[in-house]
Image (cartoon, rainbow, N blue to C red):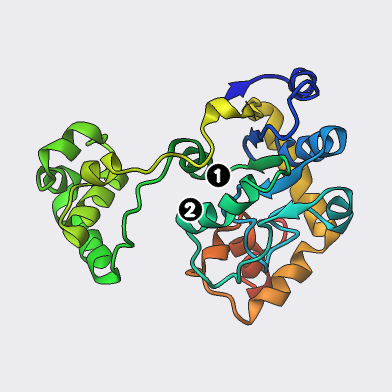
Amino acid sequence: MSKEPAIEFMRKVTALPDGQPVLIAGPTASGKSALALRVAEEIGGRIINADAIQVFSNWRILTARPDEMDEQRAEHRLYGHVPGDMPYSVGQWLREIGPLLNDGKRPIVVGGTGLYFTALTEGLAEIPPTPEEIRNGANTLMETHGHVWMAEQLDAKTQDRIDLNNPVRVQRAWEVLRATGRGLASWQDDTPPPLLPLQRTCAVVMDAPKEWLTPRIEKRFDAMLDAGALEEARANLADWSPDHPSSKAIGASELIAVLQGSLTLDQA
């Protein structure tokens, strides 16, 4: 995916053939959603979410999901359709986005979850979920033996393929081998073709320096508070659990802590 100014990207977009997919990726507060709306209004299309947190229904303001006015300007799909306490995987997202790519309406896929874009454009190995007991055992072994020992337990093909200095990658590979009896590399070799090869799309990454993004993020959080983010947190308080998938929303745990009295709003 290319990195280029939005104005140059729009020049390219306006010349696209009818129906050609558009991909817009980038970090928080980089202007992805606004660009997606502009694309939809100028050349037509359906905006499809590729953010792992914006799929959840219980945090609309805090996750900067499109508001009702945005939804009136263009069709939006795969936003806020999953209960906040329900697990949701990239595999589920691929199954849901599949039919939206082939019904004749231009897909404009936008979000900040890199794994979603990788799975969409490169394919996803269909590895079964890791049972909780194996995950817990792996956590214990990582604490007691470390990732070097755990890496030594992997099959040679996987050892050659993954970053053995990355404890998270090593543990994941160990869990796959233990749970399935097959090495991670073997599963990856069976990856099905991608739903949307990158070369078929017009894609851009909204790249921006940290010194530009940081004040935008701070201002956006203040705007979220003005829009009712604390009230949204209060609505989540009764059912709050840090283990819920939606609890990974940036700022969620801090706002809950404010309501519980362990943080001030200034500290949050």
Q: Which residue is located at x 77 percent, y 41 percent?
A: 45
| Residue ID for mark 1 | 113
Q: Residue furthest bottom?
A: 238
- Residue 196 sits in quarter: top right
Under circle 2, the secondary element is helix
Q: Name the residue located 69 percent from the left edge and 33 percent from the top edge.
A: 213
Left or right of residue 109: residue 140: left
- Give the residue at mark 2: 90
Name the foreground residue: 122 vs 163: 122
- Residue 65, visible in the rendered structure: no
- Residue 62: x and y, percent? 71, 58
Comparing 147 with 263, the one in front is: 147
At mark 1, the secondary structure is loop
Q: Amino acid at mark 2?
A: Val
- In the rendered view, does 73 fall on the left or right side of 91? right
Residue 110: % across, % down: 66, 41
Residue drawn where x is 75% and y is 52% of the image: 76
Sequence-earlier tag: 1 or 2: 2
Image position of 123 (left or right of 247) = left
Q: Please name the residue shown 54% across and 55% down the image.
A: 93
